[in-house]
Image (cartoon, rainbow, N blue to C red):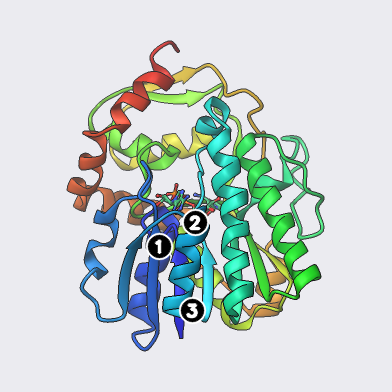
């Protein structure tokens, strides 16, 4: 089978490309990525020369280009990871979130309709459900939880999800959607919480934590996200949404303290900064459907995944140091200099 993996030079798409190329040598994996600030070809370096892998640079919003790519490649499966993903950036400048996350999805699905595919899979997020109160630990997001977004990022992801469901209903396009909780693991861009804290702690720099650090996220190792998507592609029911989560709820402060302890660094490095506008309180997924229907089980817990991830950052310094030396530094200054 031939897979198109969009956004495959990013964090999760990159991990998924590695997973697919190595797990299914008989399948062809084509990664399409625009290489925005978040896309990094160094992430794909270990698989670049594999015979079942190919990289194509391009924009999912470019209708003519996408049409031509589909005509030439004749994909069986399309997995759409390509998106603008950083919530803070969506607060600063929402427009590109709308064009990439919504219009890009439409352009891809139009090509799927025209050329025919076995499955279009949309990679979505728990953030489409909004947030849960901190004092109700009994509440979880299920696939039936209404869409209720907070940021331009989550609104754009929700818009795309609704469009995917509409294409299924109206045009009978074979689709699935997965909504996953926060991921961590190798190749994570160092503006996100866990790699940001690891890289700054290693340099003995202050660790900026939003508000009082009590916001809760449900953490999943990126490897477990990849196995879940693989299962959905092969066994998931057409038109269905599957929640993916690890039952690993942690406050941001707990995450930062765990990292500091693992690196033997002092908690005095923690520096509380002004909260993000509209900051969601708690996300927590109920993954019962994918566990019972498809038999998915995560391999990592937070306690085993964090040391593995720290170890990866320690042994792959060149990967993240190249990023820190680039444009990312200017962005970091812009976001944190006045706090
Ligand atoms: P990322 O920002 O690391 O990667 C996104 C990739 O998409 C980048 O390589 C970028 O160059 C590419 N891209 C952006 N605009 C493009 C365009 N117009 N055309 C082609 N490529 C383009 O993101 P990520 O964290 O790997 O997230 C991947 C997907 O998973 C996203 O759809 C995101 O909403 C979803 N998701 C992420 C998380 C998480 O914790 N990171 C959790 C749940 C869902």
Split into 4 quadrants, where in the image is the C terminus? top left
Judged left or right of residue 254, residue 140 is: right
Give the Cα distance between marks 3 and 2: 15 Å
Q: Which residue is mark 1?
A: 32
Find out if the beta carbon at label 1 lies less than 8 Å from the nearest ligand 1 atom.
Answer: yes
Query: Image quadrant of residue 37?
Result: top left
Q: State the image coordinates of residue 198 (x, y, percent, origin top left).
A: 32, 39
Q: What residue sits 55% from the left and 28% below the top? A: 213
Q: Which residue is mark 3?
A: 75
Q: Nearer the viewer, residue 209 or 87?
A: 87
Q: What residue sits 29% from the left and 57% below the top? A: 43
Judging from the image, what secondary structure is the residue with disc 2 in?
A: loop
Of the two numbered discs 3 and 2 on the same chain, state the one appearing first in sequence: 2
Judged left or right of residue 167, residue 79 is: left
Find out if the beta carbon at label 2 lies less than 8 Å from the nearest ligand 1 atom.
Answer: yes
The dot on residue 60 is: 2
Q: Residues within 10 Å of mark 3 (few under 14, many from 20)?
A: many
Q: State the image coordinates of residue 112 (x, y, percent, origin top left).
A: 59, 72
Circles 2 and 1 in contact, beta carbons < 8 Å:
yes
Q: State the image coordinates of residue 168 (x, y, percent, origin top left).
A: 74, 70
Q: How many marks?
A: 3
Q: Nearer the viewer, residue 244 or 88?
A: 88
Of the two numbered discs 1 and 3 on the same chain, state the one appearing first in sequence: 1
Q: Is residue 297 above or below residue 320?
A: below
Q: Nearer the viewer, residue 320 or 117?
A: 117
Q: Residue furthest bottom?
A: 26
Q: Is residue 188 above or below residue 24?
A: above
Q: Is residue 265 visible?
A: no
Judged left or right of residue 140, residue 228 is: left
Judged left or right of residue 222, residue 163 is: right
């Amino acid at each position: 089978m031939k897979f198109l993996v969009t956004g495959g030079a990013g964090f999760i798409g990159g991990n998924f490309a590695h997973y697919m190329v190595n797990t299914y040598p008989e399948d062809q994996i084509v990664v399409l990525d625009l290489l925005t600030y978040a896309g990094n070809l160094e992430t794909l370096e270990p698989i670049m020369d594999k015979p079942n892998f190919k990289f194509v640079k391009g924009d999912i919003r470019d209708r003519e280009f996408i049409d031509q790519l589909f005509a030439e490649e004749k994909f069986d499966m399309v997995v759409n990871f390509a998106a603008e993903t950083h919530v803070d950036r969506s607060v600063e400048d929402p427009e590109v979130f709308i064009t990439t996350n919504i219009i890009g999805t439409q352009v891809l699905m139009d090509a799927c309709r025209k050329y025919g595919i076995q499955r279009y899979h949309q990679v979505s997020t728990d953030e489409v459900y909004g947030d849960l109160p901190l004092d109700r630990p009994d509440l979880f997001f299920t696939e039936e939880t209404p869409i209720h977004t907070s940021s331009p990022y989550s609104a754009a992801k929700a818009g795309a999800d609704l469009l995917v469901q509409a294409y299924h209903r109206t045009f009978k396009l074979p689709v699935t959607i997965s909504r996953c909780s926060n991921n961590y693991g190798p190749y994570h861009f160092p503006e996100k919480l866990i790699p940001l804290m690891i890289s700054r702690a290693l340099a003995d720099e202050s660790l900026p934590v939003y508000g009082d650090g009590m916001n809760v996220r449900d953490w999943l190792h990126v490897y477990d996200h990849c196995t879940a998507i693989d299962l959905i592609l092969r066994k998931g029911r057409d038109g269905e949404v599957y929640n993916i989560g690890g039952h690993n709820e942690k406050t941001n402060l707990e995450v930062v303290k765990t990292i500091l302890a693992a690196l033997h660094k002092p908690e005095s490095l923690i520096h509380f900064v002004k909260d993000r506008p509209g900051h969601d309180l708690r996300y927590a997924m109920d993954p019962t459907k994918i566990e019972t229907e498809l038999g998915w089980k995560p391999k990592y817990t937070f306690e085993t995944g964090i040391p593995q991830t720290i170890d990866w950052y320690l042994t792959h310094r060149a990967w993240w140091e190249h990023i820190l030396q680039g444009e990312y530094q200017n962005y970091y200054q812009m976001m944190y200099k006045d706090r």
